[in-house]
Image (spheres, rainbow, N blue to C red):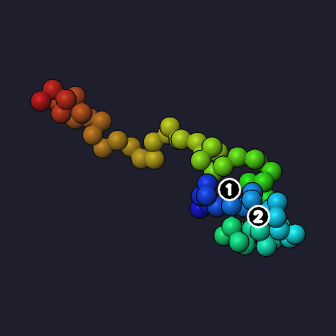
Amino acid sequence: MVTDQQVRRLLKLVQTNKYFGTAAAKAGMDEKTARKYIQLGQLPSEIKSDHDWRTRNDPFCDVWPQVQSK
């Protein structure tokens, strides 16, 4: 997982280094990942979206009204 700090460092290194691969390695990420963030122009925290779906059924859905009443 790439952090905002790594992408900020990548953006600085791309301006100063001659080779893109070297800048990506110094920032601690793969070239393909680095290209993705360069093209997007956004930090990972800006891209991340919250999901609103459930990953499993709610085990308390049948008894929840009883729990709330107490």
Whole-percent x, y for residue 59 in the image: 30, 44
Q: Secondary structure at mark 1?
A: helix
Q: Tag 2: residue type?
A: Leu
Residue at (50, 37) in percent of width and height: 52
Which residue position holds label 1?
8
Above-or-below relation of 38 to 70 = below
Image spot of residue 44 (x, y percent): 63, 51
Q: Three-letter amino acid code at disc 1?
A: Arg
Could one spot residue 21 in this view of the protein? yes
Label number found at residue 65: none
Question: Eyeballing the image, is 25 above or below 35?
Answer: below
Q: Nearer the viewer, residue 1 or 5?
A: 5
Q: Is residue 62 left or right of residue 12?
A: left
Would you place residue 33 above or below residue 26 in this image? above
The quadrant holding residue 29 is: bottom right
The residue sitting at 42% across, 47% down in the picture is 56
Quadrant in which the N terminus is drawn? bottom right
- Which residue is drawn at the image coordinates 18% and 33% (left, top)? 67
Q: Is residue 36 visible?
A: no
Q: Residue furthest left?
A: 70
Q: Earlier in the sequence, mark 2 or mark 1?
A: 1
Residue 40 lies, in percent from the top left, at 76, 47
Residue that numbered label 2 is attached to: 13
Horizontally, is 6 left or right of 17 in the view? left
Crowding near the residue tagged with mark 2, few <14, some 14–19, many ≥20 C-alpha atoms within 10 Å: some
Q: Secondary structure at mark 2?
A: helix
